[in-house]
Amino acid sequence: MKTAIVYVSMHHKNTKKLVDAIAEQYDVTVIDGVRDHDFNLAEFDRIGFASGIAFGRFYPQMLKIMNDKLPEGKDVFFLYTYGVKAGMYCNAARKIAEAKKSKGPRRVRMPGLRHLRAYETDRRHFKGPP
């Protein structure tokens, strides 16, 4: 199954670090959603969307990529990094995937990883190590 992960990693590059670590272990094509503009996801069977979280949702750039580039009927999964645990970060992304009649999103099973808390710049939210 041919797999791509499109990522948007803006602030501390935590999402890029996560995607790079996955790419070292699995046969995936990695696409930088900020730098790479001319890509076609139709050739992939499974597409992952990896994003940092801003204001409780995927980065707006990622949601635009999903709206513009996600072909209908693809198997999708989501990865995300966040600084403050606040809730369901995937709601907007899930709605886009559903509108594109995607299969999923599915939970990706990786030993020891359910979600990834990352560096938070806003110290008002910091309550100690994650």
Image (spheres, grey):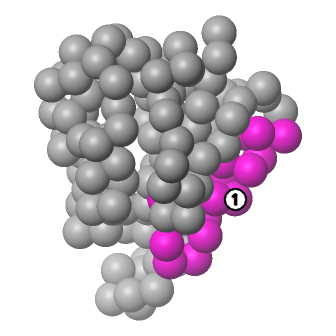
Could you say where residue 95 lies in the image, as x and y percent from the top left? 16, 33
Could you say where residue 72 lies in the image, as x and y percent from the top left? 29, 18
What span is in magenta?
A: 7-24
Number of other residues with Cα within 10 Å of mark 1, as a class: few under 14, some 14 to 19, many 20 or more: few
Number of labelled discs? 1
Comparing 65 with 118, the one in front is 65
Asked whether the viewer can see residue 33, the reply is no
Q: Is residue 99 left or right of residue 128?
A: left
Q: Which residue sits at x=36%, y=38%?
A: 69
Type of amino acid under label 1: Lys
Could you say where residue 71 lies in the image, as x and y percent from the top left? 34, 24
Comparing 74 with 121, the one in front is 74
Q: Is residue 28 left or right of residue 85?
A: right
Q: Split into 4 quadrants, where in the image is the N terminus? A: top right
Say above or below: 102 vs 110: above
Q: Which residue sits at x=39%, y=87%?
A: 122
Residue 18 sits inside the magenta stretch: yes
- What residue sits right under mark 1 in the picture? 17
Q: Tell me which corner region of the image, top left, top right, bottom left or bottom right, holds residue 22.
A: top right
Could you say where residue 31 lies in the image, as x and y percent from the top left? 60, 47
Q: Which residue sits at x=56%, y=56%?
A: 36
Comparing 86 with 42, the one in front is 42
Q: Split into 4 quadrants, where in the image is the C terminus? A: bottom right
Q: Which residue sits at x=57%, y=38%?
A: 5
